[in-house]
Each structure stands twice: as C-alpha cells, then as structure tokens.
Amino acid sequence: MSKIDELIRQLCSDGVEFVPLGNVLTVLRGKRLTKPELDEDAEYSVYHGGLEPIGKYSINNREADTVMIINVGASAGTVGYSRKKFWSSDGCYCLSHNSKLNSRFVYYLLLTLQGVLMSRVRRAGIPTLDKKVIENLKIPVPPIEVQQEIVDILDKFTQLEAELEAELEAELEARKKQYEYYRNQLLTFDDAGGGAMDNPRGAGDVL
C-alpha cells in the first residue's frame, strides 16, 4: 500500500468528497493595464491571455503560489502557476487561496482537466472561457496531508522532467554540431582543376 493510500485509509475511510470548485475557491478576474502603464524595470510580471508575461508593473494584485487560468485568446483554458507575486490582467483568471486546499495540488489537478477547460472555450469571435465553467468543475478535496504527499511526488517528477529536457537539449545541440562538421567534411571535394570545392549550397537551401 502506498503512503497516499495509507493516508486516505486513515483520514477519509469513507472516500474523498467531490465538490464544485466554486464552492471552495473564488475565481478572481484581473484588471487590464494600458501599454503606457507597463514598465520593464518594474518588479512584477503582468499576465494577460497567455502564460508568458506581457510586461511588468510596479505593484501586484496576486500573491505568490497562485493558480491562473487563461480566459481569452488562443491560449484560453490553459492552466498556469506562479511561485512569485504578479499582476493579473482581465485575460487571466486566478484562484483564491483556501487553507483546506494546497494551491500546488489544485494546479496539478487542473492540469488533468485542462482539456475539459479548452473544450468549453467559446470560439465565436475572440476565444473566451466563461467563469462559470471553472466554478462548476467537480474537484476532489482529500485531506491536506494527502494533497501534500501528491504535490511532493509530482514536484519531484516535474524537476526530473526539466533536468531530462535540459540534458536532451544539450545532447541535441552537440549532435547538431557533429552533424554539421561531418556534413561539411563529406560534401567538400577536391576540384579536378586543383584546390577544393566546397558544397555550393547552404544547409538551408532547397533544391
């Protein structure tokens, strides 16, 4: 029996309760900033319509360790998480904090439901995810100890995945350089008239 199974057996022998997300968390809508208000020298990242910051701002309206859900544009329905304080624009919903819910647990949980969120985006005109869709999601609320154990396990896997990706990128770059070296060696010929004749085409040329 895993530690998670043991904790569930001890702390909630009757099973885990499922409730609408809106019953335990508040879906917060941010406030849009105008372009002149953004300041690249400011401290806090600004999110609107995507998980890449659109700029920075001098104050924050969201605390660290907050779950965000993009609600407009091509990325509508995408789930994100910020370990730092930030500014949420009106194109980025955020979830309130609750002592009975580990925010990181909620993040991992919503990642498994991201496909559902994306499927509920209204596509007419500008893609938009309605607040009610998020509030009506049924989510499990296991004991906080179980949530923490799940987070610990998934955080370790996330770290391992990031390390593996970095190693693969480094290996890929090394192989690319090796390929370019051998390509240049193999495609360089001695000209019958004397001297060497390099391949006249660059790597990106199309025949």
Image (cartoon, rainbow, N blue to C red):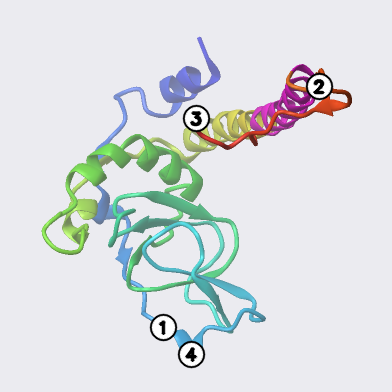
**Marked residue nearer the N-terminal end (2 or 1):** 1
How far apart marks 1 and 4 lie (CA) works out to: 8 Å
Instruction: State the SS at label 4.
Output: helix
> Of marks 1 and 3, which one's residue comes earlier in the chain?
1
Q: Where is residue 57 in the image (x, y as percent from the top left)?
A: 55, 81
Dot 4 surroundings within 10 Å: few (below 14), some, or many (20 or more)?
few
Badge 3 element: loop
The amino acid type found where label 2 is placed reads: Asp
Check disc 3: other Cα within 10 Å, few if <14, some if 14-19, many if 20+.
few
The x, y position of residue 171, in whole percent, is 73, 25
Residue pointed to by mark 1: 33
Of pointers 2 and 4, the one earlier in the residue sequence: 4
Q: What stretch is highlighted in magenta?
A: 164-186
Q: What residue type is labelled 3?
A: Leu
Q: Nearer the viewer, residue 199 or 38?
A: 199
Three-letter amino acid code of the residue under disc 1? Leu
Apparent side of residue 117 relative to residue 89 in the rendered image (left or right): left
Q: Residue 191 carries which label?
A: 2
In the rendered image, the vertical position of residue 127 relative to residue 148, given as above or below: below
Residue extending furthest toward the front: 193
Q: Distance between the residues labelled 2 and 3?
A: 22 Å
Q: Tell me the residue that label 3 is attached to.
A: 207
Q: Which numbered disc, 2 or 4, marks the residue closer to the eye?
A: 2
Q: Position of residue 204 (x, y in %)?
A: 58, 37
